Image (cartoon, rainbow, N blue to C red):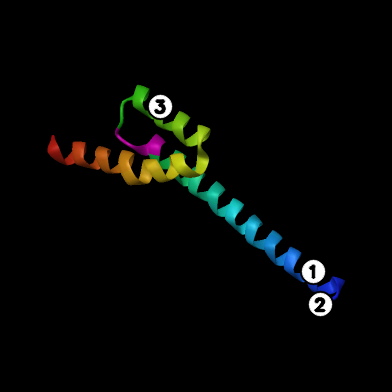
Amino acid sequence: MGDSGRLVVAGGAMTVALAAALAALVLAIAALLSVLRSRLCTAMKIVWVGVVLAARFLGSLAWFAVGRRSTEHRATSH
């Protein structure tokens, strides 16, 4: 494989990395919007926004896995 083959592999890896970064950004924005639209008190919204901003990918996943479900459970239990 010549130099052009290496460029194709590097370009493909760059495309995958860019797509993953874009997906993580979209996930973080969606999480932030979801937090701000939730029925949480202001203090808890600030905490969740901090979590999402501090650890964008894992914080966003945590919000959708734990935080959002806990607000739905509270809303239905009242």
Please tell me whether residue 37 is drawn above or below residue 22 in the rendered image.
Answer: above
Q: Determine the CA span between mark 2 and mark 3.
A: 52 Å
Question: Which secondary structure class fits the magenta region best?
Answer: helix
User: On the rendered image, what quadrant is the C terminus found in?
Assistant: top left
In the rendered image, the residue lying farthest to the bottom is 1
**Location of residue 5 in the rendering, given as x and y in whole percent from the top left corner:** 80, 74
Of 41 and 64, which appears nearest the observer?
A: 64
Q: In the figure, is residue 43 to the left or right of 76?
A: right
Look at the numbered discs 2 and 1 and tell me whether their residues touch, using CB distance below 8 Å: yes
Which of the 4 quarters of the picture holds residue 12? bottom right
Residue at 80% across / 67% down in the picture? 7
Span highlighted in magenta in the image: 35-39
Residue at 61% across / 58% down in the picture? 19
- Which residue lies under the disc numbered 3? 47
- Is residue 24 part of the magenta span, yes or no? no
Residue type for callout 1: Arg
Residue 6's disc number: 1
- Which residue lies under the disc numbered 2? 1
**Location of residue 26 in the rendering, given as x and y in whole percent from the top left corner:** 53, 50
